[in-house]
Image: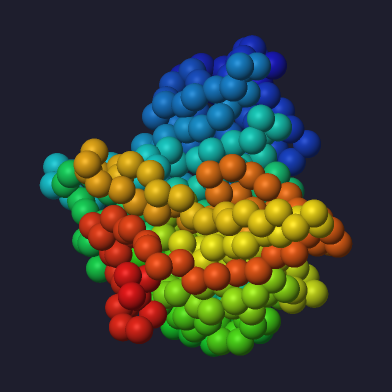
Amino acid sequence: MFRVREQGRAETAVYCPNIRPHPSMRYETCMADAHMDRIETSFGTVSGIADQTTYANGAVKSCRLAVENRLQTPIGEVIPLYRQAEIGERNKKDRRSLGFFESGAIKSIALDQAMPLRTPLGLLKAEAVSFYENGAINRLFPLNGQIDGYWSERKEAELAEPMDFDLPVGKFRAKVISLHFYPSGALKSLTLWPSERITLNSPVGPLRVRKGFALHEDGTLRSLEPAKVEDLSTPIGLVKAFDAEMIGMSADLNSVQFTRAGILCSMKTIHTGLRVKSADGVEVRIEPFETISRIDDEGQRTVPMQIDFGAGTVKVVAQHTHVFDTAHTTLATFARERVVREACSSCAGCEGGDGCCQN
């Protein structure tokens, strides 16, 4: 039951299946009138609900607001999105003003305009933010524009403002798509705009990075995406690390990976193959394989091979997956002579030069 008050009428108690109470939230109204309803949350009053979606159990999943609201959050005062773009104006990617966990705790807020927010890294401007269920910041998005036929990625990138960072893994200035935090507040990953390049201090030395990087919770480097081919020394020999088919919208997981102790444990390559000799002297070669191009039925592309180092094992993911016991197998790397790339997709933003994967 919830208490609802309408103009000219006494307060009445009604049952509202779309809103369920939560220890951190206090509800005072229901959906009797879209522009009169209000919900008291732990972040403040939410009113002027234009429409909403619900979970299967009836709990509010998201809502769109039609009037200005000011919420007091752990990261500062925010104004959720309430103004809709006019024809020809830039649209927001997420038009929902608020998202909720099934428990009722606020999960995400799309801001009406970019605002400076208090984060574990200091004040950072953002247009959207998400939270963990306990209220800690989860992800922060400096921009939240909808990329479509009317608004290009290039136009959105032009709006991005460079941010300054001074981290244990490096000091740099770059345009950022998103920041991801652990529930503790430690930085989990940082995703760059496609054209951005930074230099990080890694356990194997300084590396030029594209896409972004991820950190262990203690701040040590977990993974990164090389901007060019990098010669990395491994227990089985030199590997030319580069992921020619880098995919994904975030840098939570990247191709070159390290343990908390700083040990190189995984990478991808299109330039390096493996010679594997078993205890009985039989030798086989494993290499990245060629397959049909995704943009030209008559063309081909080289699919990156992944090499993972474990405790006494080496796992190789190529056309087939292999796991070798290093105590009974001899592995050695060799440089491949043939690499096939899809220039129009994989080479976008390539820095060229001696590090170009076509060389």
Q: Position of residue 87 (x, y in %)?
A: 14, 42
Q: Residue furthest top?
A: 15
Above or below, 133 against 144 in this view is: above
Q: Relative to residue 217, is residue 256 drawn left or right? A: left
Relative to the observer, which residue lies in front, 346 or 315? 315
Q: Relative to residue 51, is residue 342 drawn left or right? A: left
Counting every numbered tag in the picture gives 0
Q: Relative to residue 56, is residue 258 drawn left or right? A: right
Q: Position of residue 173 (x, y in %)?
A: 44, 83
Q: Position of residue 270 (x, y in %)?
A: 46, 62
Assign the N terminus to one quadrant of the image: top right
- Using the rendered view, name the quadrant where residue 341 is placed: bottom left
Q: How has the structure been colored for display?
A: rainbow
Q: Position of residue 347 (x, y in %)?
A: 30, 64
Relative to the observer, which residue lies in front, 169 or 241? 241
- Using the rendered view, name the quadrant where residue 200 is placed: bottom right
Q: Residue at x 47, y 32 (%)?
A: 63
Does the rendering let one see residue 78? no
Q: Residue at x 18, y 44 (%)?
A: 149
Q: Residue furthest left?
A: 88
Q: Residue at x 60, y 50 (%)?
A: 317
Does the rendering let one see residue 17? yes
Assign the C terminus to one quadrant of the image: bottom left
Q: Residue at x 66, y 30 (%)?
A: 102
Relative to the observer, which residue lies in front, 325 or 244? 325
Above or below, 354 against 317 in this view is: below
